[in-house]
Structures are given as C-alpha cells and as structure tokens.
Image (spheres, rainbow, N blue to C red):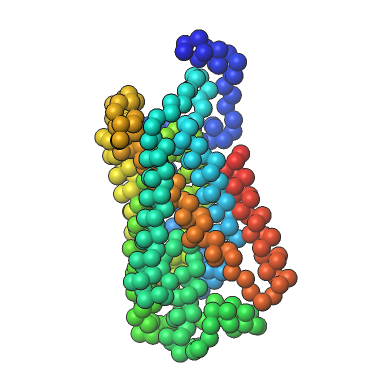
C-alpha cells in the first residue's frame, strides 16, 4: 500500500486549481466548521436579496433561474453524490479500494428511496392541509395557484382559469399587476397556505442543513459542490416563497423577517447532521470500520448522504420539472422560453461537471 501511494503521488503531482483555492479559502476548517460556514453562505445572501425584490414579483419570471437550479441539483446528485455514495472519491495522495459487501448497496439504495419518499409525503400532506390549493413543493408552482386563488377571493377576477390568467393580453392586465390584497381581503385558505409554507420551508431547510453536513463529512470537494448546488437553488426558492407570503397578506418587511426565521432550520439541520456524524458515523471511531447496520461497515451517519441524494432527486425532478413543462398558447414565445430554460439547465449541470 505504501509503495502504491508513493507511486501515485509521484505519477500524479498535485496541482491547485482556481476552484480548489477558492474552496480552501471558503472552507478552511474541519467538516463541522465547514458545514456551518456553508449553511451561513446559503442562508444569508439569498435572504438579503429579498430586499431588492418588488412586492408584486411574478413567480413565472423565475422559470429560467429555476431551470438553472435544477441543472445544478441534478448535476450535483448524478456527478458527485451518487458516485461518492457507492464508490467513494479518488484522492490524489493515496490509493483507495472499493470493498463489495453483502447488503451494503441495498441499504444505500433504501436510504435514497427514504429521502425521496419523505419529500413526497411532506408535499402530499401540505396539499391535503391546504385543501388542494397547492402545497409547498420546493418549487414555485404553488405561487401560481395561490395568485389565482387570491384574485378570486378579492373579487378582482372570478371564474378565470389558470390558463386564462397565463394567456391574457395585454400584459397590463396580468396577475402580476393586481395589487396585493389587503389583510381583510385575504381568503382564509390563502392565508393558511402562507403559514403552512413557512412550516414547510423550515422543514426543507433542515434537510438542506443535513445535506451540507453529510457532504462535508464525505469529502471537502463533495461538501463544496453541494454548497454551490444548494445556493443556486435557494435564490429562486426564497424569491418564490417571498412572493407567496406577499400574496398571503404579509408586508414586505414581515415576509423578509419570516424568511430569516425559516433559515434557522438550516442551522438546526446542520447541527443535527454534525451530531449524527460525530456520534453515529464512521468518524466516531476514527474511521475504523466495524460491524454496523445489517453486518456491513455502514453506520447511521453514513445514511445521511444517500438520504440527501433522494431529496435532491425529488426536488430536481418531481417538484420542479412539472413547472418547467407548463406552456402557454404562444408557440413562438414558448419555444424561445424552452430553449432558454434548457440552456440554463445545461449551464447549471455544466458548472457541477467542471
């Protein structure tokens, strides 16, 4: 092993790329410290950007940014998380071997599915709680539905379908130009959707924190790339939630304050993930692999990364793709928008690939 390690170092001299130097500057500490720093990076800037957002922002205008975030999330999942989960990451200074264990891949696959199904259950539960008005699906399709619901509730427009709202012309009469309804005009179900959205946002931020902690304990590179992917996703996600809160009767200041409160969920999730890794993961025994789950070397902390991959798969496919598939009656405009969305998606995935 020592001879192989020496040969690898001699044959592949390490070279520090620009991205490696940036990551080293942003994440200079231990996995726990780096996870907390990453949580600060993904929670702070997107929330401060809300100060620049107009109260009547149209969630449909975020479609290109959402497509970019989808590319980043799927790229991180397919290029980084899944290979790391099943095979591990190559290291420049030593040789690594993959040991095939009975039931290990099975357990990892189960953890991925549990993460996926967890988000399905959360999304479904919130849709039931809001009476079918649209739950919090970590995307922004729910904002479209609540805009239509709020206009019906205020009497501004009745018996108008979503397609009619989307296709109406001229632009001066679109749903975005309808002023935010006053507190007493807010339909109770729309207001409930706003508060449920905050609860769901808090919960989803917990899973983001779990994702960051588990990825940094896997490797510094996986942690850094996952931070980038989550950051790209948080910007349209936070803006979309901000628009929903405005439609639910929140003032701009109150909506921003509520979003800052939900950001606490990310730090909570990060701390939970750190505790699990420190006391229930392979790091708890200094990396020594002993009998674990179902006789494998897996510990409970090792299940967080596949759980994260499952949640990312749900967010990047089931939750967001249906929104990108929505089209209007203007074929030329929709074709141009579709090409722009695909370009944005490939750009996000390309950054993860690089």
Residue 263 visible: no
Farthest residue to the top: give it.
3
Q: Where residue 298 sits: x, y (%)?
A: 34, 33
Is 83 located above or below residue 73 in the figure?
A: above
Q: Left or right of 340: which side holds 287?
A: left
Q: Left or right of 347: which side holds 332?
A: right
Q: Quadrant of residue 173?
A: bottom right
Residue 186 visible: yes
Q: Quadrant of residue 126?
A: bottom left
Q: Where residue 97 sits: x, y (%)?
A: 47, 23
Q: Quadrant for the C terminus, please.
A: top right
In the image, 71 versus 64, the foreground residue is 71
Q: Left or right of 263: which side holds 13?
A: right
Count of marks placed on residues? 0
In the image, 222 versus 32, the foreground residue is 222
Q: Left or right of 69: which side holds 287?
A: left
Residue at the image point whose x is 43% and y is 28% from the top: 100
Residue at the image point whose x is 60% and y is 15% from the top: 11
In the image, 320 versus 87, the foreground residue is 87
Residue at the image point whose x is 60% and y is 60% from the top: 64
Q: Where residue 67 sits: x, y (%)?
A: 58, 57
Is 324 located above or below residue 15 in the figure?
A: below
Farthest residue to the left: give it.
279
Is 39 located above or below residue 291 in the figure?
A: below
Residue at the image point whose x is 48% and y is 32% from the top: 87
Farthest residue to the front: give it.
102
């Amino acid at each position: 092993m020592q001879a192989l390690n020496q040969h690898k170092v001699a044959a592949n001299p390490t070279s520090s790329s620009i991205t490696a130097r940036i990551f080293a500057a942003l994440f200079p500490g231990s996995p726990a410290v780096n996870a907390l720093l990453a949580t600060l990076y993904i929670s702070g800037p997107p929330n401060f950007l809300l100060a620049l957002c107009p109260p009547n922002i149209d969630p449909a205008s975020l479609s290109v940014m959402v497509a970019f975030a989808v590319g980043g999330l799927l790229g991180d999942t397919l290029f980084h998380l899944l290979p790391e989960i099943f095979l591990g990451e190559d290291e420049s200074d030593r040789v690594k071997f993959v040991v095939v264990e009975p039931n290990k891949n099975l357990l990892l696959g189960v953890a991925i599915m549990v993460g996926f199904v967890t988000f399905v259950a959360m999304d479904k539960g919130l849709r039931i709680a809001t009476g079918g008005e649209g739950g919090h699906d970590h995307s922004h399709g729910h904002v479209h539905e609540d805009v239509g619901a709020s206009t019906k509730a205020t009497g501004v427009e009745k018996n108008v379908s979503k397609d009619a709202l989307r296709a109406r012309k001229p632009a001066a009469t679109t749903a975005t130009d309808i002023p935010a309804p006053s507190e007493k005009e807010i339909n109770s179900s729309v207001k409930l959707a706003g508060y449920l959205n905050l609860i769901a946002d808090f919960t989803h931020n917990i899973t983001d924190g779990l994702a960051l902690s588990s990825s940094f304990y896997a490797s510094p590179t996986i942690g850094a790339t996952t931070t980038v992917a989550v950051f790209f996703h948080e910007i349209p996600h936070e803006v979309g939630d901000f628009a929903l809160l405005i439609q639910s009767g929140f003032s701009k200041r109150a909506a921003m304050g509520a979003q800052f409160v939900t950001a606490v969920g990310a730090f909570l999730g990060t701390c939970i993930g750190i505790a699990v890794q420190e006391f229930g993961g392979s790091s708890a025994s200094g990396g020594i692999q002993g009998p674990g789950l179902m006789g494998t070397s897996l510990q409970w902390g090792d299940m967080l990364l596949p759980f994260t991959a499952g949640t990312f798969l749900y967010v990047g496919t089931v939750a967001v793709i249906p929104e990108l598939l929505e089209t209007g009656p203007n074929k030329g405009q929709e074709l141009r928008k579709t090409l722009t969305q695909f370009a944005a998606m490939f750009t996000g995935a390309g950054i993860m690939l690089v």
